[in-house]
């Protein structure tokens, strides 16, 4: 749900248009989800790919 909300906040509102935001209760800072690799590096869609089961190598 948080990811869907984050997407909507980025793409469904005009620049400067007011909308509700998900924030940390104590600080008021915006909450953001990040996709990360197994070793903890952040990664964007340009660096990711979905591998089909048939493309995965068996050990």
Image: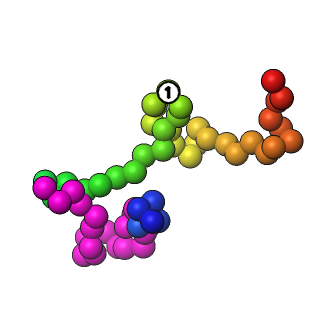
**Which residue: 67% across, 42% down?**
49
Residue 35 x/y as whole percent: 48, 44
Residue 53 placement: quadrant: top right
Magenta region, main secondary structure: loop
Q: Looking at the image, is 59 positioned above or below residue 17?
A: above
Taking the image as shown, residue 10 lies to the left or right of residue 26, namely: right
Instruction: Determine which residue is flagged by label 1.
Output: 39
| Residue furthest out toward the top | 59
Q: In the displayed structure, does residue 52 sit left or right of residue 11?
A: right
Over which residues does the magenta segment extend? 6-26
Label 1 SS: loop
Q: Position of residue 30 (x, y in %)?
A: 25, 56
Mark 1 crowd level (few <14, some 14–19, many ≥20, 10 Å Cα): few
Q: Is residue 2 magenta?
A: no
The correct choice, above or below, for 25 with respect to 43 in the image is below
Q: Residue at x 58, y 38 (%)?
A: 47
Point out residue 27 in the picture as x, y percentages from the top left corner. 13, 54
Magenta-drawn stretch contains 24: yes
Q: As rendered, which of 30 and 46 lies closer to the eye?
A: 30
Residue 18 visible in this rendered orientation of the protein: yes
* Res 7 visible: no
């Amino acid at each position: 749900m948080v990811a869907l909300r984050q997407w909507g906040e980025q793409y469904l509102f005009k620049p400067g248009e007011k909308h509700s935001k998900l924030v940390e209760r104590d600080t008021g800072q915006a909450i953001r989800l990040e996709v990360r690799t197994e070793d903890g590096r952040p990664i964007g869609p340009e660096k990711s790919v979905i591998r089909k089961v048939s493309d995965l190598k068996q050990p």
